[in-house]
């Protein structure tokens, strides 16, 4: 029989699946309803054959996303409700002892078990879905190498971190969770700096943008925007995918701007300047520390929850563990199930993220003196990435971290009037 706390967890899982299903259905219907022609406000973004392809791509991604969600939910349910985790934990600690290292490795083994069933989905997404629409540039060999490398990097980083966390419980006692929070936060800040320096180069080639008109234009723009950039880097994103992107990592002296080679190929110099100005806008408007503070508060709440729950006998016992099983199972259960509760905060968090996008867009428009280059860039990106031009408003409100193309254009053009 399911325990009360398991019933709550099952209800949360069912509610998330139901919520996502309703939103995905609405979205699918909205795409189908608009499949005949490009919406008038966006005429000129795509020609008819490209729009037909974008509709087909959006529908295929919609269907794939639903499968993905069901498979992931099935794996989660099998682990959490089948009584598998407590037996696994008991057998593991019988064999390897209840030391920090043994429990850290147990958590890692569960992580590996969760990652393996997702691999076929990942393969299908890359070599069937993305390939069918001409986006995939990866090979099976590269894909396998990525998985092995990614797994080893994660293992090397996460295992010692988990060991430290679990040791804090023993070393510090009552306030271990506050120290644990500080530790993970420090780790995240360190990764912001080290990731582009040490980890990204394991997967991609990063090179400074070569000297020339494009670089001097972009550097001049960065200067004008009040952002002293040491260098702008180009990443060979085309090695894996035709999708294009630009991003910003690090902070302070360690900040870096990275442009995908695909982006440089797709956009004109003026449009690239507008995209760079948008990225600098995020920096200038303080979005990075704001998002860091927000994620820190979630992290602190998560650690507080782990501490409270591991000392609440109904929680661990409710999931079949010994009531004194301690921090490792509590950490795992909060990590596995926390998302089911915070899922309902997505619209709130995404609306904050969308507000930041509007602010960065406005910054870019004011920096490059006009909305035309950014609108041009956004339109081209929508066309090249076969973006869904007609998401259902509920779907985009809930799931979109960026405003839709129409919303962004209206904000960019409208504020000028
Ligand atoms: Zn942005």
Image (spheres, rainbow, N blue to C red):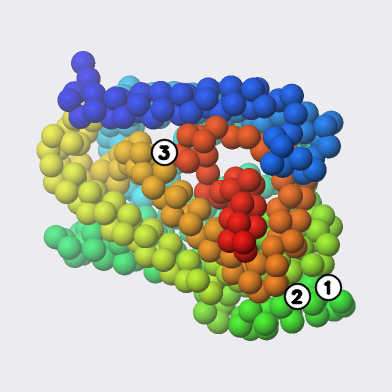
**156 on left or right of 133:** left
Q: Residue 233 at x, y = what percent?
A: 72, 70
Name the mark nearer the viewer: 3 or 2. Answer: 2
* Secondary structure beneath label 3: helix
Mark 2 or mark 3, which is nearer the start of the sequence?
Answer: 3
CA separation, marks 2 and 1?
A: 6 Å
Q: Nearer the viewer, residue 302 or 170?
A: 302
Which of the numbered marks, if any, corresponds to residue 214?
A: 1
Residue at (61% x, 51% y) in the render: 410
Classify 10 Å Cα crowding around label 3: few (below 14), some (14-19), many (20 and above): some
Classify 10 Å Cα crowding around label 1: few (below 14), some (14-19), many (20 and above): some
Residue at (46% x, 39% y) in the render: 398
Q: Is residue 223 above or below residue 375?
A: below
Q: Residue 108 at x, y = what percent?
A: 43, 45
The residue carrying mark 2 is: 218
The residue carrying mark 3 is: 110
Taking the image as drawn, is residue 163 in sight?
A: no
**78 on left or right of 315:** right
* Secondary structure beneath label 2: helix
In the image, the residue with mark 2 has its CB under 8 Å from the nearest atom of ligand 1: no
Q: Nearer the viewer, residue 379 or 232?
A: 379
Q: In the rendered view of the protein, which quadrant contains the N terminus?
A: top left
């Amino acid at each position: 029989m399911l325990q009360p706390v398991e019933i709550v967890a099952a209800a949360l899982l069912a509610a998330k699946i139901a919520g996502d299903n309703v939103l995905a259905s609405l979205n699918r219907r909205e795409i189908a309803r608009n499949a005949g022609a490009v919406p008038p406000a966006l005429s000129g973004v795509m020609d008819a054959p490209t729009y037909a392809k974008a509709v087909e791509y959006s529908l295929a991604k919609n269907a794939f996303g639903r499968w993905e969600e069901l498979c992931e939910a099935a794996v989660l349910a099998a682990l959490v409700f089948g009584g598998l985790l407590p037996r696994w934990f008991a057998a593991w600690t019988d064999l390897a002892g209840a030391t920090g290292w043994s429990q850290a490795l147990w958590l890692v083994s569960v992580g590996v078990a969760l990652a393996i069933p997702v691999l076929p989905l990942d393969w299908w997404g890359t070599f069937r879905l993305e390939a069918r629409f001409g986006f995939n540039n990866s090979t099976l060999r590269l894909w396998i190498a990525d998985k092995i490398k990614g797994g080893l990097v994660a293992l090397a980083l996460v295992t010692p971190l988990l060991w430290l966390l679990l040791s804090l419980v023993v070393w510090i006692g009552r306030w271990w969770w506050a120290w644990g929070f500080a530790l993970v936060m420090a780790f995240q800040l360190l990764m912001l700096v080290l990731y582009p320096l040490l980890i990204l180069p394991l997967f991609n080639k990063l090179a400074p943008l070569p000297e020339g008109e494009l670089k001097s234009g972009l550097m001049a723009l960065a200067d004008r925007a009040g952002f002293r950039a040491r260098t702008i880097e180009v990443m060979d994103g085309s090695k894996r995918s035709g999708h294009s992107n630009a991003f910003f990592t690090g902070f302070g002296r360690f900040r870096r701007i990275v442009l995908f080679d695909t982006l440089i190929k797709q956009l004109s110099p003026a449009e690239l300047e507008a995209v760079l100005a948008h990225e600098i806008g995020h920096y200038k408007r303080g979005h990075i520390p704001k998002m860091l503070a927000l994620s820190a508060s979630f992290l602190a709440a998560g650690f507080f929850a782990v501490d409270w729950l591991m000392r609440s006998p109904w929680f661990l016992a409710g999931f079949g563990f010994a009531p004194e099983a301690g921090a490792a199972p509590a950490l795992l259960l909060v990590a596995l199930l926390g998302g089911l509760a915070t899922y309902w905060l997505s619209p709130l968090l995404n609306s904050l993220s969308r507000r930041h996008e509007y602010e960065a867009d406005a910054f870019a428009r004011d920096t490059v003196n006009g909305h035309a280059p950014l609108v041009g860039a956004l339109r081209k990106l929508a066309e090249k990435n076969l973006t869904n031009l007609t998401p259902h408003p509920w779907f985009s409100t809930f799931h979109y971290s960026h405003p839709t193309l129409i919303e962004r254009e209206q904000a960019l053009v409208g504020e000028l009037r």
